[in-house]
């Protein structure tokens, strides 16, 4: 199961719901075989009970029954059109179904709604998260290389969460706007008093609305946000519509040595460096800074990521858009952070 556990959505059958609760209690005691048996009986009683199917898949997976887990997750997917539980992701992790399915909005929203209250402590104390610090250093370096002060009239924090990136960039911005899909995360950010405006919305809808209003930002941030997107070109293209002419896009993203996007066992996406560069170029952007870094520690190991600061592609930069003039000025400073 995920760290937050499956989202409970009632079957509408009181007996089936009680059996589900009994099964979860058995699993909590470590008796996974008993839990699997009870859940199998539960879904016989309520065949459209997506929560029970998902829990059965997770427990069978824990028991080493891959075939049984896939069968249960398929049933959960079929019974849950909005994929609240993330069954499509579990199937991809097990090598079945789409290899890189998009995460549904309901799944991402409920994941972070459940995680919001302990988000800061988990990232900063347990995982050694330093994405915002690395981003602020990279942005400052790019601005210095361009002969400009690291200060922006307006900044937009995409997937702002509880405001960890907002805290790092507030001193650089006259006006700071934050947007997140999770109302609970927005509530945490609101309590910190960092933002001039906060919005609860999905990224594409918010950005499209801002573009329609001719809003432009001098800096757009996305700290560990694109790890929840399986396809970067559409979001980069939309971001391009709200970037001011001399603006920067700064983001972190997990990476891997292959090609394209890859779903990791953590159920986050890693994006190959070539995929990142191509997606930026397709949106008329090019990296002014691109460096490998470990933005967090997970299970005792560094999580390999890229720290990227991009600007509009300019005539006179390299033909393939791999670096801009400002990146050439300070590329010797890049490398593992």
Image (tube, rainbow, N blue to C red):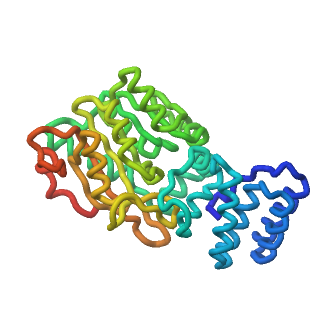
x and y percentages locating residue 72 in the rendered image? 69, 65
Q: Residue at x 32, y 44 (%)?
A: 250
Task: Examine the rendering and report whether any part of residue 286 can be seen.
Answer: yes
Does residue 138 lie above or below 255 as drawn? above
Residue 231 pos. (x, y %): 41, 50
Relative to 260, is 191 on the left or the right?
A: right
Q: In what quadrant of the picture does the C terminus appear?
A: bottom left
Q: Which residue is drawn at 31% across and 27% down?
A: 153
- Quadrant including the N terminus: bottom right
- Left or right? Give the position of 30 relative to 201: right
Question: Residue 117: in sight, yes or no?
Answer: no
The percent coordinates of residue 230 (x first, y second) are 44, 53
What's the residue at 47%, 42% (across, down)? Answer: 159
Residue toward you, 4 or 54:
54
Q: Residue at x 36, y 24 (%)?
A: 215
Taking the image as shown, residue 299 lies to the left or right of residue 309, namely right
On screen, residue 128 above or below 322: below
Furthest residue toward top? 213
Q: Quadrant of residue 145?
A: top left
Q: In which quarter of the image is residue 285?
A: top left
């Amino acid at each position: 199961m995920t760290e937050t556990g499956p989202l409970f959505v009632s079957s509408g059958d009181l007996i089936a719901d009680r059996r589900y609760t009994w099964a979860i209690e058995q699993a909590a005691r470590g008796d996974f075989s008993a839990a699997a048996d009870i859940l199998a009986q539960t879904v016989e009683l309520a065949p459209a009970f997506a929560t029970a199917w998902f829990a059965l898949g997770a427990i069978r997976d824990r028991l080493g029954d891959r075939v049984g887990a896939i069968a249960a997750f398929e049933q959960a997917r079929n019974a849950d059109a909005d994929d609240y539980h993330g069954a499509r992701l579990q199937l991809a992790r097990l090598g079945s179904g789409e290899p890189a399915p998009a995460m549904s909005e309901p799944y991402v929203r409920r994941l972070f709604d459940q995680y919001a209250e302990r988000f800061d402590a988990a990232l900063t104390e347990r995982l050694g998260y330093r994405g915002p610090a690395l981003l602020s250093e990279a942005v400052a370096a790019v601005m210095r290389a361009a002969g400009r002060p690291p200060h922006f009239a307006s900044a937009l924090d995409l997937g702002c969460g509880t405001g960890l990136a907002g805290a790092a960039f507030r001193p650089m911005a006259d006006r700071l706007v934050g947007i997140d899909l999770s109302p609970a995360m927005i509530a945490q950010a609101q309590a910190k008093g960092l933002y001039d405006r906060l919005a609860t919305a999905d990224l594409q809808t918010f950005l499209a609305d801002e573009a329609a209003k001719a809003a432009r930002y001098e800096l757009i941030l996305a700290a560990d946000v694109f790890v929840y997107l399986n396809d970067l070109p559409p979001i980069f293209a939309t971001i391009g519509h709200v970037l001011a002419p001399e603006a920067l896009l700064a983001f972190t993203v997990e990476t891997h040595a292959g090609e394209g996007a890859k779903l990791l066992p953590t159920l986050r996406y890693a994006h190959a460096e070539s995929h990142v560069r191509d997606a930026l170029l397709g949106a008329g952007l090019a990296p002014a800074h691109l460096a490998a870094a470990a933005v967090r520690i997970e299970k005792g190991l560094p999580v390999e990521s890229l720290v990227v600061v991009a600007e509009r592609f300019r005539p006179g930069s390299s033909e393939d858009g791999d670096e801009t003039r400002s990146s050439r000025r300070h590329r010797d400073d890049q490398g593992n952070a």
